[in-house]
Image (spheres, rainbow, N blue to C red):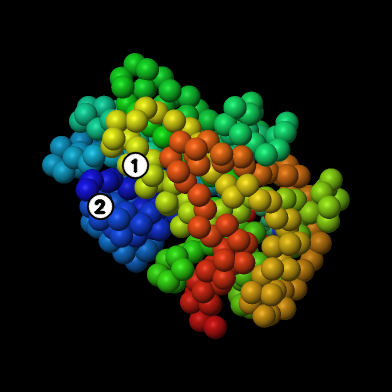
């Protein structure tokens, strides 16, 4: 069993990862500055409060209790904010990540799992999107992630630091047992917003455009259950610990659902009304984003357990009811 440093382990995906690692018998140390994560979301392992951009802190940490691998979930994720304040995104998502990687090099830690994103592809030229699809991020958020992927290639070639980059499509859902869930502030993601409209924490959900070139006119996305994402990380961890080379994988269900389908399914799953408004298009939203995840299935044996949108919504609803107290 391995010792894994989970950077950003108090956030949405990180907190699920900590539970998955613990369940798989691994030892976990979490590093999180709690700028957007929550202390009470860390349900296993040791939490160290601090920043991944703090080289001195990392030196102490990696020298006193060296991990076998590092997983990195500590990024800012709001596309609109990244356009308004790119400095924040390049500083944290890129420069601080480099500080972390340099500290790993100094301490001989050579296995890294990176949370990348479908945003590195920008406006897709073809769908479903496989790993070879041209990269062309259209905002600083996507660019900061793509820059890290390129840095990882160079660090592997020059320093032998092996990395698996997992390009998430739309992470959604929550721990089926309701222990942790999605809790962004402000919340910008469709599924939690729809469920907040169902629970009454929000008046309505605004549909961002219904004039796209899709069957019902609303955007299509590939929603992947956070537990399935974590499973992919566990497989990537095993591969790296077995000496596998660096790799990049697209991670989605391969099924796309439209905004309207998400709202209709949420109505069924929750049994509640979900008031809707029609809004204008959100800048930078491609009509369709769907993953081709065949590579990770072929190479690591990954397959989604909760591929159904209903499962994703049911588990997210358990969490929303907990948050809303309904
Ligand atoms: N969306 C929407 N209303 C909202 C939030 C999102 O219609 O209040 C749409 C958005 O335009 C996109 C889809 O839902 O087509 C998923 O958006 P989200 O922000 O969850 O993820 P993204 O695809 O941007 O990563």
Q: Where's residue 242, x and y in %? A: 29, 35
Query: Along the line of sight, which residue is nearer the eye, 280 or 72?
Result: 72
Q: Where's residue 300, x and y in %? A: 43, 40
Q: Can residue 94 be seen in this view?
A: no
Dots 1, 2 in contact, CB < 8 A: yes
Is 75 placed left or right of 20 in the picture? right
Which type of secondary structure does the marked residue at label 2 adopt? Answer: loop
Task: Using the rendered view, name the quadrant where residue 109 is placed.
Answer: top left
Mark 1 crowd level (few <14, some 14–19, many ≥20, 10 Å Cα): many
**Is the CB–ligand 1 distance for label 2 below 8 Å?**
no
Q: Which residue is drawn at 61% across and 57% down?
A: 189
Labelled disc at residue 219: none
Q: Which residue lies furthest to the bottom in this view?
A: 326
Labelled disc at residue 237: 1
Is 75 placed left or right of 3 in the picture? right
Is 141 placed left or right of 274 in the picture? left
Q: Quadrant of the C terminus?
A: bottom right
Q: In this view, does 326 lie above or below 101?
A: below
Q: Where's residue 206, x and y in %? A: 74, 62
Which type of secondary structure does the marked residue at label 1 adopt? Answer: helix
Q: In this view, does 107 lie above or below 257?
A: above
Say which label, 1 or 2, has the lower sequence index: 2
Q: Name the residue under label 2.
A: 26
Q: Residue at x 57, y 47 (%)?
A: 252
**Is the CB–ligand 1 distance for label 1 below 8 Å?**
no
């Amino acid at each position: 069993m391995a010792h894994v440093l989970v950077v950003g382990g108090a956030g949405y995906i990180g907190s699920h990862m900590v539970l998955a690692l613990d369940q798989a018998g691994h030892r976990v140390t979490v590093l999180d500055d709690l700028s957007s994560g929550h202390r009470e979301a860390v349900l296993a392992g040791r939490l160290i409060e601090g920043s991944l951009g703090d080289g001195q802190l990392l030196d102490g940490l990696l020298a006193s209790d060296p991990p076998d691998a590092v997983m990195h979930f500590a990024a800012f994720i709001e596309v609109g904010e990244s356009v308004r304040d790119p400095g924040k995104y390049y500083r944290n998502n890129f420069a601080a990540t480099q500080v972390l990687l340099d500290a790993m090099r100094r301490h001989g830690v050579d296995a890294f799992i990176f949370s990348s994103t479908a945003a590195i592809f920008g406006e897709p030229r073809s769908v479903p999107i496989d790993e070879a699809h041209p990269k062309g991020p259209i905002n600083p958020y996507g660019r900061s992630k793509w820059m890290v992927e390129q840095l990882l290639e160079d660090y592997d070639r020059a320093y032998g630091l092996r990395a698996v980059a997992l390009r998430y499509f739309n992470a959604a859902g929550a721990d089926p047992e309701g222990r942790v869930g999605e809790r962004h502030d402000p919340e910008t993601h469709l599924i939690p917003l729809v469920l907040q409209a169902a629970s009454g924490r929000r008046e309505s959900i605004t549909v961002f455009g219904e004039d796209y070139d899709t069957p019902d006119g609303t955007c299509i996305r590939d929603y992947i259950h956070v537990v399935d994402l974590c499973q992919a990380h566990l497989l990537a961890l095993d591969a790296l610990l077995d000496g596998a080379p660096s790799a990049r994988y697209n991670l989605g269900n391969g099924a796309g659902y439209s905004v309207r389908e998400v709202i209709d399914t949420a109505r069924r799953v929750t049994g509640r009304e979900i008031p809707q408004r029609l809004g204008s298009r959100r800048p930078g939203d491609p009509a369709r984003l769907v993953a081709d995840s065949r590579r990770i299935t072929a190479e690591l044996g990954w397959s989604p357990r909760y591929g159904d949108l209903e499962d994703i919504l049911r588990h997210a609803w358990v969490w929303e009811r907990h948050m809303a107290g309904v």
